[in-house]
Amino acid sequence: AQSVTQLGSHVSVSEGALVLLRCNYSSSVPPYLFWYVQYPNQGLQLLLKYTSAATLVKGINGFEAEFKKSETSFHLTKPSAHMSDAAEYFCAVTPTGFQKLVFGTGTRLLVSP
Amino acid sequence: DSGVTQTPKHLITATGQRVTLRCSPRSGDLSVYWYQQSLDQGLQFLIQYYNGEERAKGNILERFSAQQFPDLHSELNLSSLELGDSALYFCASSVGTQNTEAFFGQGTRLTVV
């Protein structure tokens, strides 16, 4: 079964620093991959998605992710963190042939001034 | 605002009771998905409907059921509630069945006491 692993349940950065949130997937075929963000007491918002087109995907709020097949990774980055980026981030995969999202365990991003 | 509406936002009920959660998808979306988010299980896919028909089933308990009506809104029915059913229940919708982009509602927080 396809799955994603998010390394680090919490990541702390200073405002202005690089944000790197890690996600590795397990799949025998090219998957669809997603990053969602969840702000406190809110639903999930799609940040970006990979659907086998360009390997570097740009999303909203300055985030981007690179699909690396050789490393089975889809890490999320942002060059400069902002206080408003503090939230929980979920990597997700759609298993081939299924119509559901399989989520990772989430990474809480803390941004300090 | 994702365009997906869930009601109620909060629900407190006693063990053994039955509740109904409602979801109105984005205009034009035919697929509706239900997810459960709990501290111990994380984000879990429950069930998907497409244009009134069940399309995929995940980790949904037998005490839970769902349906999608002709106007495309969906209801998730939870019965014989247990303390462990306390969670945030999300509805998401997408245009088709491949779940390439799903938009999430803000969720219904269910507390079973």
Image (cartoon, coloured by chain):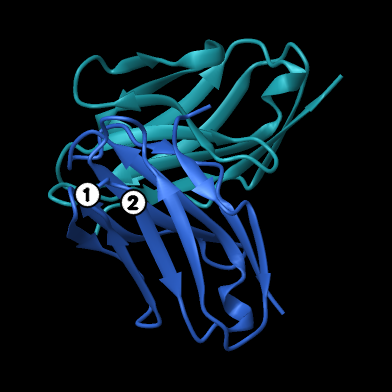
Chain colours: A cyan, B blue
| Occupied quadrant, residue A85 | top right
Q: Residue at x 60, y 42 (%)?
A: A107
Residue A64 as seen in the image, left or right of residue A18: left
Secondary structure beneath dot 2 equals: strand
Which residue is the site of mark 2?
Answer: B33
Q: Residues within 10 Å of mark 2 (few under 14, many from 20)?
A: many
Q: Residue at x 37, y 21 (%)?
A: A66
The kind of residue tagged 2 is: Tyr
- Picture coordinates of residue A9, whole percent (x, y): 63, 48
* Chain label for disc 1: A
Q: Nearer the viewer, residue B20 or A89?
A: B20
- The reply to whether dot 1 and dot 2 touch (C-beta < 8 Å) is yes
Q: Give above or below for A93 relative to B39.
A: above
* Chain label for disc 2: B
Q: Give above or below for B111 relative to B49.
A: below
Q: Nearer the viewer, residue A12 or B60?
A: B60
